[in-house]
């Protein structure tokens, strides 16, 4: 923690002693939550006690994510640590974000198997693919076939990325029931990612959100901001979730982009988050992390994320590591760690490389040692 605090000068960072610990849960309190939350989500009620032993009742949104995006959501504002965990929701983006930069084309059947495995681990939101130009992202040229194969999976939301109306229409035709648009806080990243200016991207997203509204399709908005400071990830993604707010979505997203841009180069997520939280209600805000500098887990605690599509950026944070950390914090995720590990192992074996998850590596070593006894 100090290695983050001192070089970054995070004078506003709360000290660890102020972090509330969650001491008890009542799993029987898990019940369906309001309709704008996805299937499989629930509130889990518990007691959060501070070091001074004062306890209060809290509710946690139990959900699931995997390899890439970690969304730390909070219903209350200010301190990011003070109320951990308030709601934590994990969204898996491995099939899309994790694979999109793979040079060798992964067969559609492997992608579909991966999605099945992730869903069976308990993940309730899995970003399945992107309806983008196959010239720009050849790996996801099979988006239609992947969607067709998974669209009827029960108990999971399968959002897809749609950078323009063409992508949106193709996604809907393939059976997508939820989409995401992605803007940037930096003109250069916008140009290199979607070949247009930020302003042009908002015009495209207005068309997408308007078409989505007519079909009652939820849209999530991403804003990515590049933090060039070497201590933190080179790319931060802030995710205001505009489900049901189609008309205002792009306007808010623009403000998020502006607020994020103010902090480019500062190298810490905290001021950016504070600025964005002044624009977007915190319960609509989420963050997405990559592990370029090995800072993803602390950054998750600070609410931050990065991007593998950015040059030089490494992969997303491993969901296994996020779930392991959340388990350690006493935060429920409803994810079956063994099944999650199996999904990670499946795709790592296919890609012919060891898992990037420290948790997966450590747990497999423990299993191997145990089998020798
Ligand atoms: C946005 C475009 C399409 C503009 O690409 P463009 O070349 O400017 O588009 P265009 O309108 O001039 O069209 C060029 C060609 O693309 C086709 N086209 C046009 N649109 C589509 C579409 N939707 N689906 C399929 N094809 C499409 C279009 O039909 C045409 O085909 P042609 O006539 O040459 O045969 C392109 O720049 C693109 O696909 N970019 C890919 C962006 C991307 O997928 N980035 C990675 C995801 S974002 C990311 O990872 C970062 C973030 C934010 O998620 C953070 C994180 O997760 O870490």
Image (cartoon, rainbow, N blue to C red):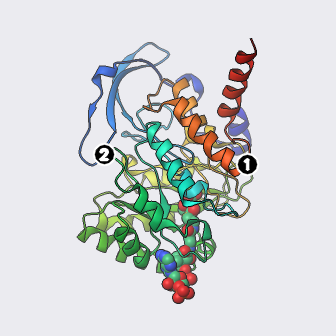
| Quarter of the image with the C terminus in it | top right
Mark 2 vs 1, N-terminal side = 2
- Residue 126 vs residue 209: left or right? right
Describe the element under mark 1 as helix, strand or loop. Answer: loop
Closest to the observer: 47 or 270? 47
Q: Is residue 281 visible?
A: yes
Residue drawn at x 30%, y 73% as measured from the top left: 210
Residue drawn at x 68%, y 44% as measured from the top left: 349
Closest to the observer: 59 or 368? 368
Q: Is residue 196 visible?
A: no
Describe the element under mark 2 as helix, strand or loop. Answer: loop
Residue drawn at x 70%, y 53% as measured from the top left: 314
| Quarter of the image with the N terminus in it | top right
Asked whether disc 2 touches disc 1, contact meaning CB atoms under 8 Å apart, the reply is no
Above or below, 206 relative to 345: below
Q: Residue most toward the front?
A: 109
Above or below, 222 relative to 135: above
The image position of residue 8, as x and y in percent, is: 70, 45
The image position of residue 45, as x and y in percent, is: 32, 25
Q: Quadrant of residue 237?
A: bottom right
Ligand 1 is found in the corner quadrant, namely: bottom right
The image position of residue 22, as x and y in percent, is: 45, 21
Disc 1 crowd, CA 10 A, few/some/many (<14, 14-19, 20+):
few
Circle 2 residue: 37
Task: Measure how far apart labels 2 and 1 are at the Cα level.
Answer: 37 Å
Q: Which mark is residue 352?
A: 1
């Amino acid at each position: 923690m100090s290695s983050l605090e001192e070089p970054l000068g995070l004078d506003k960072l709360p000290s660890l002693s102020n972090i509330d610990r969650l001491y008890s849960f009542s799993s029987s309190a898990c019940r369906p939550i309001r309709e704008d939350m996805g299937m499989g989500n629930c509130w889990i009620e518990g007691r959060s006690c501070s070091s001074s032993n004062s306890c209060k009742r809290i509710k946690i949104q139990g959900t699931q994510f995997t390899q890439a995006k970690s969304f730390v959501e909070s219903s209350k504002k200010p301190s990011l640590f003070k109320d951990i965990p308030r709601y934590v929701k994990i969204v898996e983006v491995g099939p899309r974000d994790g694979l999109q930069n793979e040079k060798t084309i992964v067969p559609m059947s492997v992608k579909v198997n991966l999605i099945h495995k992730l869903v069976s681990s308990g993940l309730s939101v899995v970003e399945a693919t992107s309806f983008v130009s196959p010239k720009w992202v050849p790996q996801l040229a099979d988006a239609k076939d992947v969607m067709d194969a998974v669209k009827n999976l029960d108990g999971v939301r399968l959002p897809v990325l749609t950078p323009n109306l063409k992508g949106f229409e193709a996604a809907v035709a393939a059976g997508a029931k939820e989409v995401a648009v992605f803007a940037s806080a930096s003109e250069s990243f916008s140009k290199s990612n979607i070949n247009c200016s930020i302003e042009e991207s908002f015009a495209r997203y207005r068309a997408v959100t308007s078409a989505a509204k007519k079909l009652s399709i939820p849209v999530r908005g991403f804003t990515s901001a590049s933090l060039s400071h070497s201590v933190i990830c080179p790319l931060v993604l802030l995710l205001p979730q505009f489900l049901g707010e189609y008309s205002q979505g792009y306007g808010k997203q623009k403000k998020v982009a502006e607020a994020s841009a103010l902090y480019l180069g500062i190298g810490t997520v905290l001021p950016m988050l504070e600025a964005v939280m002044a624009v977007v209600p915190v319960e609509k805000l989420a963050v997405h992390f990559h592990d370029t500098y090995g800072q993803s887990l602390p950054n998750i605690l600070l609410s931050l994320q990065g991007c593998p599509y950015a040059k030089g950026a490494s992969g997303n944070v491993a969901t296994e590591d996020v779930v392991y950390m959340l388990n350690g914090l006493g935060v429920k995720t409803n994810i079956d760690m063994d099944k999650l590990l199996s999904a990670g192992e499946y795709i790592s074996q296919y890609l012919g490389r060891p898992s990037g998850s420290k948790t997966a590596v450590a747990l497999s070593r423990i299993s191997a040692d145990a089998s020798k006894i």
